[in-house]
Amino acid sequence: MASRQGGPGGAETPRPGSTERRTASTTAPPGRSRRATTAGSLPPEPRSPRRAVARSPEDPPLRDPGLYALTDHFRKRLEQPGRYVSTRTVTDAIRRGQLRWNRTDGWRFALVEGGIRFVVVVGDTETDSPVVVTGWTEVADREAALEAGRFDPVDVDTIALRAALSEASETAIPDRIRPRAVTRPFVVGGHRLETDPGEPFVRCVECGCRFRSKEAITSRRCRGPSSGR
């Protein structure tokens, strides 16, 4: 069952350099390859009537953010440095983002603001209520992102690097890592990663391991001094 017990407000204003991390995780993982138990919701707004008939996967999702619960999987993303997603960006994407169907994830809302694309994956056919399954950021226009001032250069490089690792998870991408300067560690697969310009790898600040692909990161457990946190 989806509960609606006080999601954070929609007036959160990120600062340059902010990871936009909000809220804490509470319940269980989401649908499709994950279970669809959910908790929390997006900020309240004028309510739409709950749907009276079953919806098929092909039916476009609803554009009322107040109807969506947050899955545990997404709440964990809100907590992780370097994700740059918040309940505010989710609300904006559902209200105003372009709607696209993807064979892997299903329905996506995508909203470009200040050179950054915010992508939100939603579902409402396998759960008791509509849910936000997951979300992420991409760099749509680097120069525009830097000029907008919402994120600093380290943030923009972090967004670009995380996206590059995910786009080709099984492939080593040294040439896409080299241009990036990431001095505030971001989290992938339990590793806290950073890289300096010119380095063809990301480095875990906890265990010291070096990686050139996402698969290498996620297939090796971090055994650094803080890995038990």
Image (cartoon, helix red, strand yellow):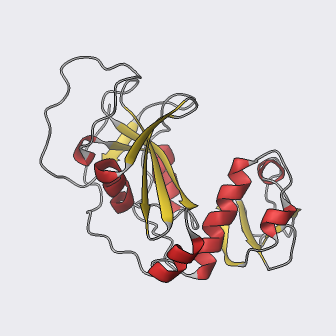
The residue depicted at 57 percent of the width and 67 percent of the height is: 81
The residue depicted at 19 percent of the width and 52 percent of the height is: 44
Q: Is residue 189 in view from this perspective? A: no
Q: Is residue 142 in view from this perspective? A: yes
In the rendered image, the quadrant that contains the N terminus is top left
The residue depicted at 49 percent of the width and 68 percent of the height is: 115
Decide: is 222 above or below 114.
above
Give left or right: position of 208 versus 79. Answer: right
State which quadrant residue 142 falls in.
bottom right
In the rendered image, the quadrant that contains the C terminus is bottom right
Give left or right: position of 150 versus 228. Answer: left
Decide: is 37 above or below 20.
above
State which quadrant residue 204 falls in.
bottom right
Decide: is 159 above or below 148.
above
Q: Position of residue 31 (x, y in %)?
A: 48, 30
State which quadrant residue 207 falls in.
bottom right
Q: Position of residue 119 (x, y in %)?
A: 48, 51
